[in-house]
Amino acid sequence: MDHDRQELERAISPEELGRYSRQMMLSGWDEEGQRRLRKAEVFVAGAGGLGSPVTMYLAAAGVGTLYVMDCDTPDFSNLNRQLLHSEEDVGKTNKAISAKMTLGKINPYVRVIAIPRRLTRDNASELVPPGVDVIVDCLDNFDARYTLNRVSVERGIPLVHASIWGWSGRITVFAPPKTACLRCLYEEGPPPGGVFPVVGVVPGVLGVMQAAETLKYIVGGPLLTNRYLILDLEQGEFYEVPIRKDPKCPICGPLQPGG
């Protein structure tokens, strides 16, 4: 057992109990729930608009280990929504490394491992470490999302998915083999696009919701599975669409009865 693991296994200190005391008042959370959080390992793919609130709130809640993956550096057009980064990071600091520095200031008790690399079909199994409890999809292209989805299905790890555009966003949780996967929902992703519009509050709302689903999975609570929640923040409207398994899905179909 390495030093970092020993640190996660030790008793919760009085300082940490004070830090987390308000959330530990929730029914079913208490100190045991907090210990489950500290032992948990979460892989966050993307340290941008969605990844910023996801990692910030998971760190604040006391998730023990956060793997943060991103291959890019910030530019000025990111700063309206990517709160992990500042003007000092623009064009200089990799986003995963910038995230680690910011998250260390939010909660020094959380172990943050920066992965400054691009996710591909060839390296996905390497980049997503064994032992990860939850994968959070904060990516901005479907090729990489499909790769992450394959890892989720093959390892049986929940995938908390969200996407944004302008004033709107969508979120769901895939929990293979019990639920559909991303490929069931989208047989094909949208064609690759360039720069798209986004209001900073939209990934803020969706990222916080992704963090909430992650916390509920670890501590215990009902998840947004088999449901696709669509938010139109411009009109203040929310829609819900049921998601069903596709028995012919090339990714999760073989896991289904008769597959």
Image (tube, grey):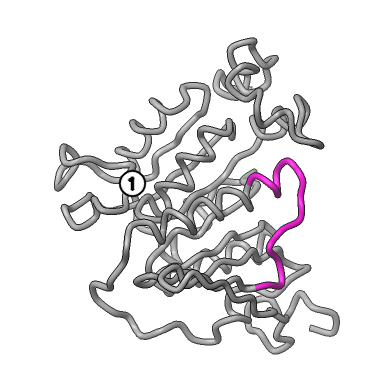
Left/right placement of residue 248 relative to residue 185 reads right
Extreme bottom residue here? 248
- Residue located farthest toward the top when viewing the structure as drawn: 14
Q: Residue 151 or 19: which is nearer the viewer? A: 19
* Residue 228 image point, x, y percent: 62, 73
Q: Tell me residue 112's x, y (percent).
A: 46, 33
Give residue 105's quadrant in the image.
top left
Give the answer, above or below, for where 15 lies relative to 234. above
Q: Which residue is mark 1?
A: 116
Screen quadrant of the C terminus:
bottom right
Q: Residue at x 52, y 28 (%)?
A: 110
User: What's under tag 1, amino acid-wise?
Assistant: Pro
When the figure is inspected, residue 253 is found, relative to residue 42, above or below; the finding is: below
Seen at 65% across and 27% down, the residue is: 22
Circle 1 packing at 10 Å, graded few (<14), some (14-19), many (20+), is some
Residue 56: say if magenta: no
Tell me the residue at 49%/59% (across/down).
206
Point out the stretch of residues depicted in magenta: 215-227
Question: Is residue 230 or residue 172 the one in the foreground?
Answer: 230
Of the 4 image quadrants, the one containing the N terminus is top right
Instruction: Name the quadrant containing residue 220.
Output: top right
Name the residue furthest right: 257
Q: Secondary structure at mark 1?
A: loop
**204 up-or-down from 172: above or below:** above
Which residue is at the front of the view, 257 or 227?
227
| Residue 128 horizontal side relative to residue 156, left or right | left
Given the current orientation, which residue lies at the most extreme front position? 235
Q: Is residue 243 left or right of residue 57?
A: right
Instruction: Tell me which residue sits at (45%, 39%) in the image.
Output: 56
